[in-house]
Image: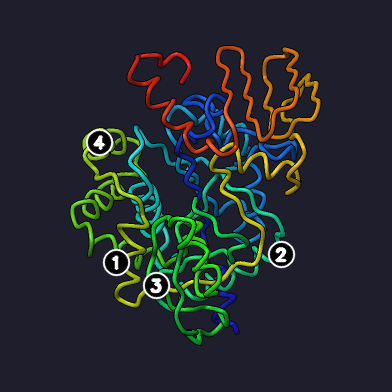
Amino acid sequence: MAHTSSALDRFYAVIPAGGIGSRLWPLSRADAPKFLHDLTGSGQTLLRDTWDRLAPLSGEQRIMVVTGRAHRAAVEAQLPTLADQNVVLESEPRDSTAAIGLAAAILERREPGVIIGSFAADHVIKNLPLFGAAVREAVASADAGYITTIGIRPTEPSVGFGYIRTGEGLGIDGAPSALSVTEFVEKPDLETAEGYLASGAYLWNASMFISRADRLLEEIGRSKPELHAGLLELAEAWDDPATRGPAVDRIWPGLEKIAIDYAVAEPAASRGALSVIPGYFDWDDVGDFASLAKLNSGGRKSDLAILGENARVLSDASSGIVVSQSGRVISLIGVKDIVVVDTPDALLVTTSENAQRVKAVVDALKLTGSSDVL
């Protein structure tokens, strides 16, 4: 077992803190994205929660955060012990392959043989001992050369997540529950999702990827050679402040925008190079206000979840969620599954059923030039 403990010694956690979370508008915005909010009433932001989950596994000095230039001050205020050299700033969003690939390339140059794990900054996870156990197995699986993901045991036939179809056990030392992945499946319709749940062969894709940095880069090189070349060139210039800026300005804008699921996970799965560790912890990506309502009502259907420090809400025979940042009195009478988000300059009213459509409002506001509220 010494092999596995040394694998954990080489582990580095990477937190991509990008994405605006446009389905959570007007709460989540360009200057205050989802990961900088407390969405669970825990008293701290989702980013801080993510850090607190990972620090016991990697150590605080071995966590890298990839975020936008605009969020640097907010991220550093949230994470005072984040090492300067572990803040990687993007000049503009380029999706997850560029973000995670750049982290992998920088860390591999600093520390050949490093094992990296990428964990989104804006997910909610409960039952940390089970989370830690899954990450330790994933690190052992990654050390054996697999691109490894942690798949979540589905609790309902969700149509909001992608799915991972599992195959046979892989018998990896230190990762007894590692399974092969036979395919990645896009978000299904309800009937398909019910079939997946019934079969027991499918896990939710939570976009947690753990891999040796060199293996991850090799997979990117195989499917996206130009992106791979750009990332290596950036990493080479990164640790010298004199060369970093010019390299970013020259290379970053031209990098292909593609999710790591498509550039790495799917091609690796088709070649039998991907493994999955089933995760038994509670996980939610808080993708919209319906999941936020469920998260804050403890799963009870009838209640009204209320978020906001000085929320003043009067409710009679109503259910759903109210997020208040304005200090206004909000009264609800006889409305079911309602979503009310009240901020000083924008008000959203919808229902849980239509919560996924909030993104369309954001797109429409962009088109009409109302970027002052985005």
Dot 2, how many residues are within 10 Å of its Cα: few (below 14), some (14-19), or many (20+)?
Answer: few
Q: Give the distance between the C-alpha atoms of the residues marked 1 and 2, in whole angstroms.
A: 31 Å
Query: Which amino acid type is marked by label 3?
Result: Leu
Q: Position of residue 247 (x, y in %)?
A: 25, 38
Q: Is residue 191 above or below residue 39?
A: below
State which mark lies toward you, 4 or 3. Answer: 3
| Residue annotated with mark 4 | 253
* x 61%, y 43%: residue: 291
Residue bearing mark 2: 129
Q: Earlier in the sequence, mark 1 or mark 2?
A: 2
Q: Quadrant of residue 53?
A: bottom right
**Amino acid type at mark 4:** Pro
Residue at the spot 52% in from the left edge and 27% down from the top edge: 25
Residue lying at the far front in this picture: please name it: 334
Residue 103 position in % (x across, y down):
40, 51
Closer to the eye: label 4 or 1:
1
Gap in Å between the C-alphas at discs 4 and 3?
A: 30 Å
Circle 2 — which element? helix
Dot 1 or dot 3, earlier in sequence? 1
Q: CA distance from mark 1 to mark 3?
A: 9 Å
Q: Which residue is mark 1?
A: 267
The reply to whether dot 3 and dot 2 touch (C-beta < 8 Å) is no
In the rendered structure, are the residues bearing label 1 and label 3 in contact, judged by CB atoms less than 8 Å apart? Answer: no
Callout 3 secondary element: strand
Q: Is residue 129 left or right of residue 97?
A: right
Q: Amino acid at mark 1?
A: Pro
Q: Residues within 10 Å of mark 1 (few under 14, many from 20)?
A: some
